[in-house]
Amino acid sequence: MQWTLQDRGFLPKRDPLTRLTDPAFCEIERLGGDLPRLVHERQFRTGAASYLTESVDWSAAVKRATDAELERLFMLFSYFASAFVHSPGLPSVDRIPSCIAVPLVFLADTLQRPPILSYASYCLHNWRRIDSSGPIVLGNIALLQNFSIPGDGKSDEDWFILVHVDIEARAGAALQAVGAAPEILDRKDVLGLTAMLDQTANRLHAMNTTMNRMPEGCSAEVYFRKVRPYIFGFNTIVYEGCFGNVPQSYRGETGAQSSIVPTMLMALGIQHQNSLLTEHLRDMQNYMPAPHRDFIRSQVSVRDFAGQSGDARVKDRYNACVSELLAFRTRHFEYAVNYIEKKVDNPIATGGTPYIPWLRQLIEETKAFMLA
């Protein structure tokens, strides 16, 4: 199994593979390495098929692949599909060729996620440590797969994704804390709840510290031109050789596919009003790894116990958690305005949502859950 809860949060329990060593996957790896250049030269659509159709038949190799190998394959084919569909400067397309579509759909079915580049591949399984004995933090992590070439957006693309990797790692202790909530509630353990909320608030604060660093290495201009174009969804795209060639539509990659905030909402008992927004957020869970979805749904709320404990420390620490969550959402909103809204007329995010009013709604509804 690729994931069990530990101090690195929703990141895989072992660092992602940096390369597939089975000879059957040689040409797939070569295409991944050449992808940024081919995209830059606007040759990916015409060149990709030659790598994949001339490669060794890898169907048998896939059947014996480990979970880590399957994740890397899925990451690579997800990038191939997005590079094919989202090719800046080229005409739009309405299909993905079978040499990409068939493996992608098979891998998606195997890993129980939609056949498109999502947060799990874009972030959770797309990094390596520079010093393998060092921590998973900015400065000691590098990206495995890019769309952009060096000198033309790569460093900003790296930073954008690696900030999220750092955030995921920092969330680990908070996830471990809220994972202990059922036992704390069973014991009616006020001291245990205080410690749990304190650890959660501290780690949410650490996440915010990393979130605040986004502008250091990813400019709004480069993000908009070189990062964002590749992570939109697919609308009525034919996956040749799959789904009876009936066009399919999927959401694009978005931070809403991270499992951290949904877990915190469940643990803190924060509930948003039913709307198209909440339907969308529920749909985002379909793009998460299955064990992450299960973990979210296993969470129990500590809100009632915190509110009824009569202990001022518990209320203060609970409110500290909500405050940090608000800070995270507020900074996200600021980035959405500065990195996207100021540059576009189209108010739709990569995940397909009218993001400005929805993000405002999330912030306002979260404020209402502070304990008086």
Image (cartoon, rainbow, N blue to C red):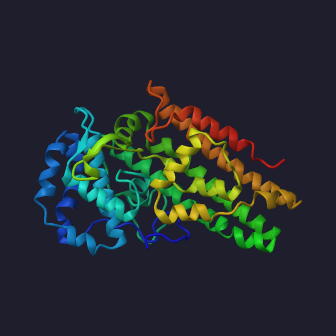
Query: Is 162 in front, or is 126?
Result: 126
Query: Is 241 in front, or is 332?
Result: 241
Count every numbered label the image shows and give the total: 0
In the image as oriented, which residue stretches furthest toward the right? 310
Residue 62: x and y in percent read 26, 69
Residue 226: x and y in percent read 34, 38
Query: Is 102 in front, or is 350?
Result: 102
Residue 172: x and y in percent read 57, 64
The part of the image, by quadrant, that contains residue 295 is bottom right
Left or right: residue 246 versus residue 46 is right
Q: Residue at x 69, y 50 (%)?
A: 270
Left or right: residue 207 versus residue 190 is left
Where 15 sits versus 243, above or below? below
Residue 175: x and y in percent read 61, 64
Where 91 sits versus 34, above or below? above
Q: Residue at x 79, y 58 (%)?
A: 304
The reply to whether residue 351 is visible in this rendering is yes
The part of the image, by quadrant, that contains residue 2 is bottom left
Q: Residue at x 25, y 34 (%)?
A: 92
Left or right: residue 372 versus residue 63 is right
Query: Is 16 in front, or is 103?
Result: 103
Where 149 sits versus 295, above or below? above
Left or right: residue 57 versus residue 175 is left
Q: Residue at x 38, y 49 (%)?
A: 158
